[in-house]
Amino acid sequence: MEASLELIERGLLVGIQDMGAAGLTGAACEMASSASTGIELDVATVPRREQSMTPYDVMLSESQERMLLVAKPERASDVLAVCTKWDLDAAVIGKVTDDGMLRIRDADGVVAEMPAQALTDEAPLTERPSSPPQFQDALQGLNHDLIPLPRDYGAVLLELLGSPNLSNKAWIYEQYDFMVRTNTVIRPGSDSAVLRIKGTSKALAITVDGNPLYCLLNPYVGGTIAVAEAARNLVCAGAKPLGLTDALNFGNPERPEILWQFELVIEGIADACKALTIPVVSGNVSFYNETNGISVYPSPMIGMVGLIDPVERAVSQWFKNDGDAILLLGETHDEMGGSEYVRVIHHREQGIPPLLSLETERALHTCLLRAIEAGFVCSAHDCAEGGLAVAIAESCLSRPQGPIGASITLAPDIPDMRIDAFLFGETQSRAIVTVEVPHVSEVQSLAQAAGVPLRTIGTVGGQRLRVGSPGLETPWVDVDVDVMHDVWTRKG
């Protein structure tokens, strides 16, 4: 990655492509076809681990951590020098041609030759039957009247924080060296990890997102939300999203219901990428993930990267200072379908996932980035799985120097909204932001200009998380942050 970034930063490349499916064959054909050119490669010059490999082996090997680079001939030595600097094997293995052909040589002889587009735009397509599963209506048919209101919202919050999807993941990422090369500015545990690009003023924010349950309940909406949440994670770190890669994991596509899920997820991802102007630069598809005819949930995972410049603008999700004002950006709707609350507390994987307006999402991104660029934002955290109460709790708990409390006063956006939907529903396009009190009015002005609803909902400080409503004598939630932290880290 670092070598690639340096090559791009120095303007040494005309093109670059990751090698994934079909290895060198796939990358070469795609690059030539997209540029309406040809490409000629000599497999005898390709670095390899085994000298006995045939041209067939070399062209179809899917060895990882490889890139196919295109540079002007006069810059080839500069590209090789950068690769040597980073201890990478590299070689000049061919050239771009103008005849539209993919031509493979092995030293002096041609071993394969065909039009590059024959393997891309002109490849034959197979049309398979596609239809929703018979149980789709039942999946979406969640009757809210059958969901009892909790007696203790604090107990619900603790149970959610201790659940596998929402609990602290440090036990996983601390098994790896996430400070390698000392480039880590914001370590894992925030919405995005942030890595500085040494020798520049810039940094990269990196995140991964996806919600298989949403995609089961509504594949199109699940696909759009996967992209939107990943982008929101980057924006909360102060990064402008640059591009994404996807990992699409599904069951047997020969079954009409699986292909239906796959098609709608792809449409959702594509529409969200177009609306948010985020290109898909790579990806992979994994089918036939099932046992005894029972498939995995449709699981598109979105890996996304964004740019922060200068790196000093990077923002983390945890609350910082006693007395900071806590702001809620975005509106909350009466939505509980597909939520962690319904799944964990009521043991139902049902309902219609929260709706997503891509226009509203864009407005939130604009507002957040402007506020961060102006230096007003102390912390920012998106509201996602677990809803508003969990997002606030995570902002209290993820602080590296130890948890900190908060006092929150909320008024439901809809007067007759259920309290559990207000606290734990997963309405999209929302973020929890903290700012110093003198800057609240300035952030309000930025939100108004972007068309984003904003309200001041509380203050950072203390050793308890209290969440209540105006005029409410007893808070809905009143929990010691150390107790929350023990549950969240699965110590309690």
Image: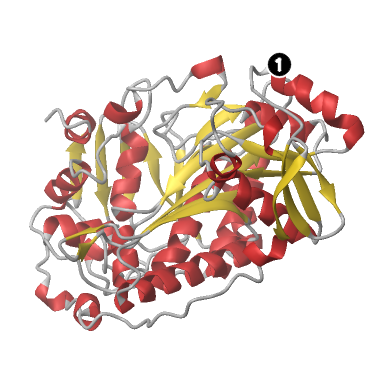
Is residue 442 in sight in this rendering?
Answer: no
Is residue 186 in sight in this rendering?
Answer: yes
Where does the image place residue 174, in percent across and percent down from the top left? 34, 23
At a point 54% along the width and 62% down the height, the residue shown is 361
Where does the image place residue 451, in percent across and percent down from the top left? 60, 65
Where does the image place residue 411, in percent across and percent down from the top left? 33, 61
User: In the rendered view, does 384 fall on the left or right side of 60?
Assistant: left
Instruction: Answer few, some or many: residues within 10 Å of disc 1's Cα (few below 14, many 20 plus, some between 14 and 19).
Output: few
The C terminus lies in quadrant: top left
Q: Is residue 401 above or below residue 215?
A: above
User: In the rendered view, does 407 fall on the left or right side of 36?
Assistant: left
At a point 18% along the width and 59% down the height, the residue shown is 343
At a point 55% along the width and 16% down the height, the residue shown is 182
Which three-letter amino acid code belongs to the residue tagged 1?
Answer: Lys
In which image quadrant can residue 1 be found? top right
Q: In this view, does 396 lie above or below 86?
A: below
The type of colouring in the image is secondary structure
User: In the rendered view, does 248 fall on the left or right side of 132?
Assistant: right
In which image quadrant can residue 309 be found? top right
